[in-house]
Image (cartoon, rainbow, N blue to C red):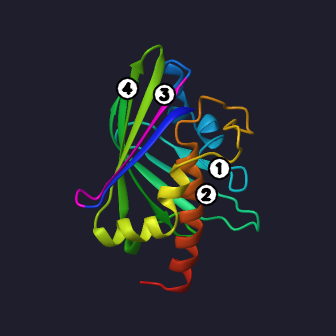
């Protein structure tokens, strides 16, 4: 992955993540569509993701958990709201309780992912829209912005063998940390 940029807009309640990949649009699209490929990057090596359900169609839902180094399993969900295969999709993303039910008190984040051809590469833009300034601040405080900014290795190579094909690898690291912290908070501070 090269050419990463991150823009946070506190007034618009958004964060935009842009990256370029040495792969065609169809290949990058499969990283979102195929749950086994999605698992390879949606969680970092210390928080691998397991998608129990991934119904990648409009109205479809995904349910997943990440297994942390201490065997904790923070859960999350997606609701797919729009698809224009293979260039764009939208989804709502939220936290889930131990039974996979949405944690309403945490709200959700709306994501829009677009893929474009750019000089023989694929440019991925992921725009996250937050429900409130408080939600944006809470996720920023949990490290979302820092997690979007870089890989786990100094050379930028993905230790799981998905070099150049890891659309949101840094986003995944953020999601794992954020899900774990929020899941623990929700468990100890019920709404």
**In this picture, which residue range is highlighted in magenta?**
11-21
**Real-space CA distance between mark 2 and mark 3, rounded to the nearest whole angstrom:** 22 Å
Instruction: Name which residue lies at 76% across and 63% down.
Output: 69
100 on left or right of 153: left
Give the mark nearer the N terminus: 2 vs 3.
3
**Marks 2, 3: nearer the viewer:** 3
In the image, 119 versus 66, the foreground residue is 119
The percent position of residue 146, horizontal first and vertical second, equals: 52, 57
Q: Which mark is residue 29?
A: 3
The percent position of residue 25, horizontal first and vertical second, equals: 46, 21
8 on left or right of 176: left
Answer yes or no: do the residues labelled 4 and 3 have beta carbons within 8 Å? yes
**Real-space CA distance between mark 4 and mark 1, rounded to the nearest whole angstrom:** 25 Å
In the image, 114 versus 14, the foreground residue is 14
Give the mark nearer the N terminus: 3 vs 1.
3
- Residue for badge 1: 50
**Real-space CA distance between mark 1 and mark 2, rounded to the nearest whole angstrom:** 6 Å
Q: Which mark is residue 65?
A: 2
Instruction: Name which residue lies at 68% across and 56% down.
Output: 47
- Residue for badge 4: 87
């Amino acid at each position: 992955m090269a050419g990463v940029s991150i823009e946070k807009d506190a007034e618009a309640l958004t964060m935009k993540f842009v990256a370029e990949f040495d792969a065609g649009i169809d290949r990058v699209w499969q990283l979102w569509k195929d749950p086994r490929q999605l698992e390879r990057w949606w969680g970092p090596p210390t928080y691998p993701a397991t998608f129990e359900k991934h119904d990648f169609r409009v109205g479809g839902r995904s349910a997943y958990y990440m297994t942390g180094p201490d065997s904790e399993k923070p859960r999350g969900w997606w609701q797919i709201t729009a698809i224009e295969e293979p260039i764009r999709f939208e989804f709502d993303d939220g936290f889930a309780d131990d039974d996979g039910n949405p944690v309403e008190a945490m709200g959700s984040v709306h994501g829009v992912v677009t893929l474009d051809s750019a000089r023989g590469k694929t440019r991925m833009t992921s725009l996250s829209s937050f429900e409130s300034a408080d939600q944006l601040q809470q996720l920023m405080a949990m490290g979302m912005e820092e997690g979007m900014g870089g890989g786990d290795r100094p050379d930028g190579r993905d230790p799981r063998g998905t070099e150049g094909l890891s659309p949101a690898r840094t986003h995944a690291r953020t999601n794992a940390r954020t899900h774990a912290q929020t899941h623990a908070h929700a468990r100890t501070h019920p709404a």
